[in-house]
Image (spheres, rainbow, N blue to C red):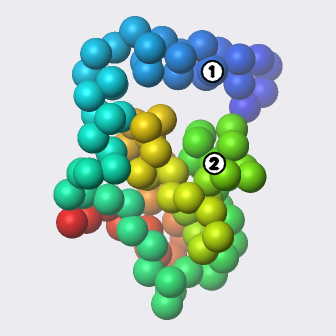
Amino acid sequence: MGGGGKNQFSSMYQYHKIGCPIAWVSGFLNKWSFFKIKLNTDTCKNCGVCDKECYISTLEPTKFSLYKADKENPGSSYSCSKCLKCVAACPNGSLKYKV
């Protein structure tokens, strides 16, 4: 993001998670949701495009990753708003949002 876009994004993100009661409920339920962002490890090329697109992985790369096995899945995080940019960005369709 150029031209201060990251600061603008951070402000909007904070408003979304702090100022919106619907975001509180959806964030709280992320860990127990039936629908999850799932990775097909057989087709994943470990290119990292999904992590570059995910705002959670971008803000906390040492803790979250969609494709690295030793990291937490950001889709289960309280902060995930299920924007699905990670799913759309995957060049070979290894990420799916499903039960």
x, y (%) of residue 80? 44, 40
Q: Residues within 10 Å of mark 1 (few under 14, many from 20)?
A: few
Q: What amino acid is labelled 2 in the image?
A: Ser
Q: Residue furthest bottom?
A: 42
Q: Nearer the viewer, residue 1 or 98?
A: 98
Q: Dividing the image into 4 quarters, which one contains the N terminus?
A: top right
Task: Name the residue: 56% across, 58% down.
Answer: 72
Q: Are marks 2 and 1 in contact (CB under 8 Å)?
A: no
Left or right: where does residue 52 sit relative to residue 41? right
Residue at which label 2 appears: 57
Q: Residues within 10 Å of mark 2 (few under 14, many from 20)?
A: many
Q: Dividing the image into 4 quarters, which one contains the C terminus?
A: bottom left
Q: Nearer the viewer, residue 48 or 18?
A: 18
Left or right: where does residue 19 sit relative to residue 68? left
Q: Residue furthest right?
A: 3
Per the model, the C-alpha gap separating discs 2 and 1 is 14 Å
x, y (%) of residue 54? 57, 47
Task: Name the residue: 32% across, 59% down.
Answer: 36
Q: Secondary structure at mark 1?
A: helix
Above-or-below relation of 53 to 2: below
x, y (%) of residue 62? 74, 52
On the question of residue 42 being in view, the answer is yes
State the image quarter where residue 70 is shown. bottom right
x, y (%) of residue 66? 55, 62
Task: Name the residue: 71% across, 24% down.
Answer: 6
Residue at which label 1 appears: 10
Above-or-below relation of 67 to 56: below
State the image quarter where residue 23 is shown. top left
